[in-house]
Image (cartoon, rainbow, N blue to C red):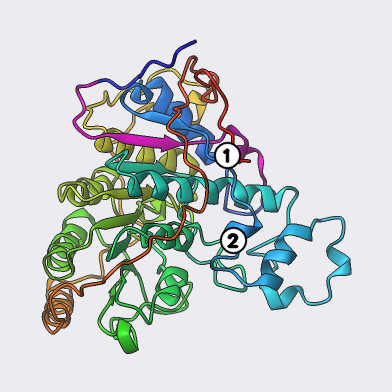
Amino acid sequence: MEYKTILNNTSKTKVCYFFDQDVGNYFYGPYHPMKPHRLCLTNNLVLNYGLHKKMHLYKARRADSEDFLRFHSDDYVDFLERVSPDNLSEWKDLSRFHIGEDCPVFPGLYDYCSIYTGGSIEGALKLNHRMYDIAINWSGGLHHARKDEASGFCYVNDIVLGILELLKFHPRVLYIDIDVHHGDGVQEAFYLTDRVMTVSFHKFGGDFFPGTGDIDEIGMHAGKQYSVNVPLHDGIDDRSYLSIFKPVIQGVMDYYRPSAIVLQCGADSLRFDRLGCFNLTINGHAECVRFVKSFNVPTMVLGGGGYTVRNVARCWTYETSVCVDTEVNNELPYNDYIQFYSPDFQLIPDYSHIPYKFENANTKSYLDNLKIKILENLRVLQWAPSVQIQDVPPDIMAIDSQEYQEDSKENIDKRGKKHNDFS
């Protein structure tokens, strides 16, 4: 049959959305906090709210070793491709790749990496070709992975690979990270260049993972002043967070003038997260997305951390609605995982009556001093660095404008008239 658009024209923002149903089938282990199943909860809420009608839906081509090698080392990619729980004992140097309790080898590990990375690469491609204003890949955002090792539940750094694709068309890319953990893997990858500015808002101090992200980490050589870190203390709430987020991002936009943005929306900065220590509400977290969106710069929106599954799904569903300019009812629609949202069954529950587990240790004077120092660092920059792009390298994967139409709420993977062919 002929393909017919499912976009509802009430949204002025053109959005594409990546999801592969298989991503929720992978399992880090019974006691591991990372649950890929949270992505199925998110997608199911998105569908049952009808938000799929405001976007184009895609199941991305899965990334392969050739894609991974654009950032990761040969031996590490070879390891990921060949390792399995069955042959784990044959590898003598697991510690070399930082494989262990935090980053276990589980069945289908390589395929899992291929799925979440494929969405970020293809999202970058579609932004490059100006097909969309926003590309969403909640499966991506695994910001800790390094060139030659896993870290912090992350194996392949899909963010770095997506940014490398954006850099083919965009002279300057801005990376913003609102995960509770420092975006160390992305910062490290671009620490020596002014082509990418990394801005991370995160918990810093004590033994909190990964231990990096002090305000004095500003980049080196050509990248000096192009790494921006906002180290925060326990318990920061919406008001305090936005009081520094908005002026810092405004300053970055004024001085750096990016032509593309990548926004990592780790939901472990929410209150009640299993591993987090901030007090952000879903409204506060989403306000960061809304503010970044207001600049009308091509933007890739990614997931990341988030370990209280029901709240991750709530947050990313609400932020999807922000991306497509759609108000949604706070009463949750019936969905396949409705029991997860007991007893309130609301998208944004009211927890104001519950005492904070973490008091806000971020005083106004501390945040004001942070803001002053960061904005002073930005002012010493020359205006946005110019980059002369000559021959544009070929796309990392073929691009097909055929959208994946959602024909039923049970299966997001309903095609139009043909299957994408990336051979």
Could you tell me residue 299's position as x and y percent? Answer: 29, 49
Q: CA distance from mark 1 to mark 2?
A: 24 Å
Quarter of the image that includes the C terminus: top right
Q: Is residue 33 left or right of residue 392?
A: right
Q: Nearer the viewer, residue 314 or 164?
A: 164
Q: Amino acid at mark 1?
A: His
Crowding at label 1, few (<14), some or many (≥20) Cα neighbours within 10 Å?
some
Task: Indicate whether 80 appears above or below 337.
Answer: below
The residue pinned by badge 2 equals 68
Q: Nearer the viewer, residue 283 or 16?
A: 16
**Magenta stretch in the rendered image:** 9-28
Residue at the image position 21 percent from the left and 54 percent from the top = 238
Residue 37's tag is 1
Q: Quadrant of residue 245?
A: bottom left
Residue at the image position 59 percent from the left and 34 percent from the top = 421
Regarding mark 1 in the picture, which secondary structure is present there? loop
| Residue 26 is inside the magenta segment | yes
Q: Would you say residue 119 is visible in this rendering?
A: yes
Task: Indicate whether 43 appears above or below 185.
Answer: above
Q: Nearer the viewer, residue 49 or 338?
A: 49
Q: Amino acid at mark 2?
A: Phe
Looking at this view, name the residue that lies furthest to the bottom.
Answer: 221
Could you tell me residue 356's position as x and y percent? Answer: 31, 55
Q: Quadrant of residue 42?
A: top left
